[in-house]
């Protein structure tokens, strides 16, 4: 059995809402909330699975990923 969470359900929900509404990456939002980015990412994923995210939410998430470079790799030329 997993140990009890040190975060209340209210805190988790508020953190998820901040992450979903923010134009910042989940990683940056997590750091600002003193959370491990993977923890927040997991909470967001569970939230989206429960609430079937809208197309707008999915587009915003992809856009955030692209803005931090995680889904938009570019080669640099070496001179």
Image (spheres, rainbow, N blue to C red):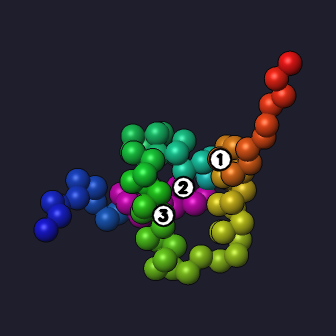
For residue 3, what is the image quadrant?
Answer: bottom left
What secondary structure is the stretch in magenta mostly built from? helix
Ranked by sequence position, the earlier of labels 1 and 2 is 2
Residue 9 image offset from top left, x and y in percent? 31, 65
Q: In which quadrant is the N terminus drawn? A: bottom left
Q: Which residues are magenta?
A: 11-21
Q: Where is residue 58 drawn, in percent x and y?
A: 66, 69
Q: Is residue 34 above or below residue 40?
A: above
Q: In the image, 5: left or right of 35?
A: left
Image position, residue 18 (x, y; %): 53, 55
Q: Residue at x 38, y 60 (%)?
A: 12
Q: Secondary structure at mark 2?
A: helix
List the single residue furthest toward the top: 79
From the image, state whether disc 3 or disc 2 is nearer to you: 3
Where is the C terminus found, in terms of image quarters?
top right
| Cα separation between marks 3 and 2 | 8 Å
The relative height of residue 79 versus residue 11 in the rendered view (above or below) is above
Task: State the residue at coordinates (54%, 55%).
Answer: 19
Checking the image for residue 44, the label placed there is 3
| Mark 1 closeness class: few <14, some 14–19, many ≥20 residues within 10 Å | few
């Amino acid at each position: 059995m997993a140990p009890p969470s040190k975060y209340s359900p209210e805190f988790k929900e508020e953190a998820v809402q901040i992450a979903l509404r923010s134009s910042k990456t989940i990683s940056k939002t997590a750091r600002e909330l003193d959370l491990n980015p993977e923890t927040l990412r997991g909470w967001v994923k569970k939230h989206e699975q429960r609430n079937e995210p809208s197309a707008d939410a999915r587009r915003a998430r992809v856009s955030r990923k692209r803005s931090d470079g995680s889904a938009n790799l570019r080669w640099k030329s070496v001179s």
